[in-house]
């Protein structure tokens, strides 16, 4: 029987409510004050009542097997960092246990484990030796760490002068080169720039393909869906979902109000450009049967439904009406546009209100979150344009009919192709 590399059993963590987000000195001060009161007055009347405690984690149970890439999602304060700290042995659980088989390297908060007064070079040696590497062992990987981090010119500068991006680059680079069996990453990619994020994801992909196990906390659903096979959703310290990443992300997204509000409140958005005589009031995604759906699968036939309203009666005839949809990545990289003007179609008969349907057969987007920008031109004038009018959630689907999609590192689009072998 294969044993899990991480086995979490009935794990709970209780904190004193008053201490939330306080530093260790504040907590020590509070304890000393209580001790002093106790010494002077005997039993302290203001002893923390039971309800001053709260459970940051409540009866958490899961097993993780070698090579799994697990995303931990959940809102602020859900307990994600607490869980990773317990797995890193930085925090003790109140009850329950976490059994770990293998060497753990964790990258929890920006620059933790760095000594500010030491240089980048000295910190690399310090960190690596804390993970049990000897000096000759560090010598061997030193150049790789430096090259990957890209902080080479600042190697002999004290870390306190590094920007937060530089710190995270160096910290990630050290962690990723320590050859851990299990790598715990908490919001690591939130700080670095996009090029570095990509490099990190590739490195982590490399680590998992050689059998390493990764736990990855992120608020970027795009990263989670691109990178993880499995998702654990923490909600107020409890597991709400544990299973396939695409299913978990879908459920999580459906519950995130701001996400749905984007569509609901399109009519109220003030960050729009254009004359405003006609405005988009709503955007929906429909399936092939024209039923509204919240997420779509790669390769699915869909419609974008753009509802509009004429705010002032149109006095002159509308001879030129063009609608356009633009699809962008999470990082605002434009992927493609769907401008009606290049097709031999006629949208000219505007009513007081109506809907434009744009059909997209076999959606060619790999799983992720995409921004949808919409615009409308009437009589060659821009009348309405809303950037990121909608966040499109794409989950895994069978674009090629083979049950497989290209690796994420190739890019975010699917294109039809064929391979032919011609013999000489
Ligand atoms: N040392 C501590 N003392 C008291 N409360 C704490 C301590 N550390 C965390 N907490 C509390 O525990 C809860 C869970 O915190 P945690 O940092 O694990 O959340 P998170 O899911 O990582 O959130 P975020 O997405 O904001 O990073 C929060 O309510 C937090 O205030
Ligand atoms: Mg956190």
Image (cartoon, rainbow, N blue to C red):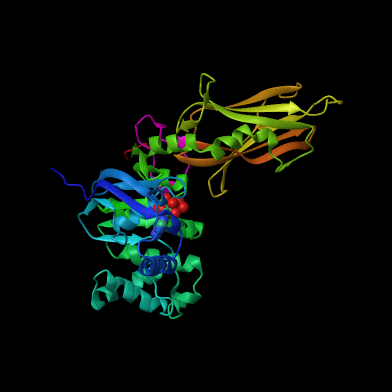
Residue 150 in the image: x percent, y percent?
44, 69
Judge whether residue 232 can be spotted in this image: no
Indicate left or right for 82 with 66 as reference: right
Indicate left or right for 161 with 39 as reference: right
- The quadrant holding residue 152 is bottom left
Q: Quadrant of the N terminus?
A: top left
**Residue at 69% over, 32% down:** 280
Q: Quadrant of the C terminus?
A: top left
Residue 203 in the image: x percent, y percent?
36, 57
Vertical placement of 141 versus 189: above or below? Answer: below
Q: How many marks?
A: 0
Tell which residue pokes out farthest to the front in this image.
41
Comparing 14 with 424, the one in front is: 14
Please state the extent of the stretch shown in magenta in the rendering. Answer: 394-418
Tell which residue pokes out farthest to the right in this image.
315
Vertical placement of 235 versus 304: above or below? Answer: below
Residue 59 in the image: x percent, y percent?
30, 44
Quarter containing ligand 1? bottom left
**Residue at 53% over, 46% down:** 330
Residue 415 sits inside the magenta stretch: yes
Tell which residue pokes out farthest to the top in this image.
289
**Residue at 31% over, 52% down:** 214
- The quadrant holding residue 309 is top right
Q: Main secondary structure of the magenta part?
A: loop
Residue 219 in the image: x percent, y percent?
46, 49
Judge whether residue 320 can be spotted in this image: yes
Comparing 276 with 86, the one in front is: 86
């Amino acid at each position: 029987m294969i044993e899990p590399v991480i086995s979490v059993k009935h794990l709970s963590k209780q904190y004193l409510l008053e201490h939330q987000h306080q530093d260790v000195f504040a907590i020590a001060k509070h304890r000393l004050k209580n001790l002093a009161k106790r010494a002077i007055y005997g039993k302290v009347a203001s002893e923390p009542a039971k309800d001053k405690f709260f459970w940051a984690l409540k009866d958490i149970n899961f097993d993780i097997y070698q090579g799994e890439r697990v995303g931990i999602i959940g809102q602020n304060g859900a307990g994600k960092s607490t869980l990773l700290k317990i797995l890193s042995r930085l925090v003790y659980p109140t009850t329950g246990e976490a059994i770990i088989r293998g060497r753990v390297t964790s990258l929890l908060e920006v620059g933790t484990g760095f000594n500010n007064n030491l240089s980048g070079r000295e910190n690399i040696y310090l960190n690596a030796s804390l993970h049990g590497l000897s000096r000759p062992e560090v010598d061997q990987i030193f150049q790789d760490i430096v090259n990957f981090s890209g902080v080479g010119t600042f190697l002999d500068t004290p870390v306190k002068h590094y920007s937060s991006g530089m710190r995270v680059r160096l910290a990630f680079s050290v962690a990723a080169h320590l050859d851990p069996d299990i790598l715990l990453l908490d919001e690591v990619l939130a700080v670095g720039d996009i090029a570095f994020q990509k490099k990190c994801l590739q490195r982590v992909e490399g680590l998992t393909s050689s059998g390493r196990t990764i736990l990855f906390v992120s608020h970027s659903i795009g990263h989670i869906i691109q990178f993880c096979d499995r998702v654990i959703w923490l909600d107020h310290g409890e597991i709400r979902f544990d299973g396939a990443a695409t299913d978990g992300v879908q459920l999580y997204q459906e519950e995130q109000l701001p996400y749905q509000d984007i569509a609901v409140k399109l009519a109220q958005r003030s960050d729009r450009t254009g004359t405003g005589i006609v405005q988009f009031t709503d955007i929906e995604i429909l399936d092939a049967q024209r039923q509204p759906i919240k997420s779509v699968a790669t390769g699915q036939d869909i419609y974008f439904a753009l509802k509009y309203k004429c705010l002032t009666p149109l006095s002159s005839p509308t001879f030129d009406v063009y609608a356009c949809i633009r699809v962008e990545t999470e990082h605002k990289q434009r992927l493609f546009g769907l401008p009606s003007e290049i097709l031999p179609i006629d949208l000219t008969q505007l009513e007081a209100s109506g809907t434009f349907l744009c059909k997209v057969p076999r959606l060619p987007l790999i799983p992720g979150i995409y921004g949808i920008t919409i615009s409308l031109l009437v009589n060659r004038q821009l009348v309405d344009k809303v950037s990121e009018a909608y966040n499109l959630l794409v989950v895994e689907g069978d674009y090629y009919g083979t049950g497989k999609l290209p690796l994420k590192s190739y890019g975010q689009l699917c294109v039809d192709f064929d391979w032919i072998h011609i013999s000489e």
